[in-house]
Amino acid sequence: MKRQSEFENRLQRLIDRVEAWSYADVDPGAGLPQEIARELKRLAAVAPSTPLRQGVRRAQDALDDGLSAETVAAALYRLRDEFAAGRAQVSPPPSPSL
């Protein structure tokens, strides 16, 4: 469970950074994409499942391809949704009422 919350926290911080990047007046080659690439690598290392690691790789591919911050953010939003859906599936069913 700790690994999942660590993943979730890192993912949200990364989404926040990419959103800030998309609204900033920053030269795309100014180092921010490299910082985000390092964060994506760290995020992949703590991903609790293979499908989530693959989602991180999709975001990394978008970044490596030079796509916009919005495209990278979209990949991270999908990843967040996949994580939430997986977490919901793992949750125990509610106890029946008597």
Image: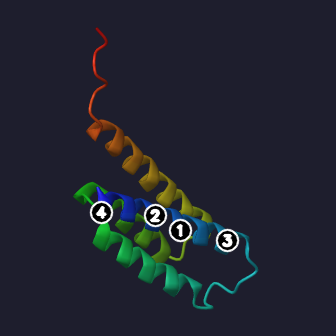
Quadrant assignment, res 74: bottom right
Viewer-proximal residue, 71 or 50? 50
Q: Residue at x 54, y 82 (%)?
A: 33
Kind of residue at badge 2:
Asn
Viewer-proximal residue, 91 or 19? 91
Q: Position of residue 71 (x, y in %)?
A: 56, 63
Q: Residue at x 28, y 21 (%)?
A: 95
In this figure, which residue is indicated by the disc labeled 4?
Answer: 3
Disc 1 and disc 3: Cα gap in Å?
11 Å
Q: Residue at x 45, y 47 (%)?
A: 81
Secondary structure category for the residue under label 4: helix
Q: Earlier in the sequence, mark 1 or mark 3?
A: 1
Q: Position of residue 97 (x, y in %)?
A: 31, 12
Disc 2 and disc 1: Cα gap in Å?
6 Å
Secondary structure category for the residue under label 2: helix
Residue 72 visible within the image: no
Q: Position of residue 54 (x, y in %)?
A: 30, 61
Disc 4 and disc 2: Cα gap in Å?
10 Å
Which disc is residue 13 wearing? Answer: 1
Kind of residue at badge 3:
Ala
In this figure, which residue is indicated by the disc labeled 3?
Answer: 20
Q: Residue furthest bottom?
A: 30
Which disc is residue 9 wearing? Answer: 2
Q: Earlier in the sequence, mark 1 or mark 4?
A: 4
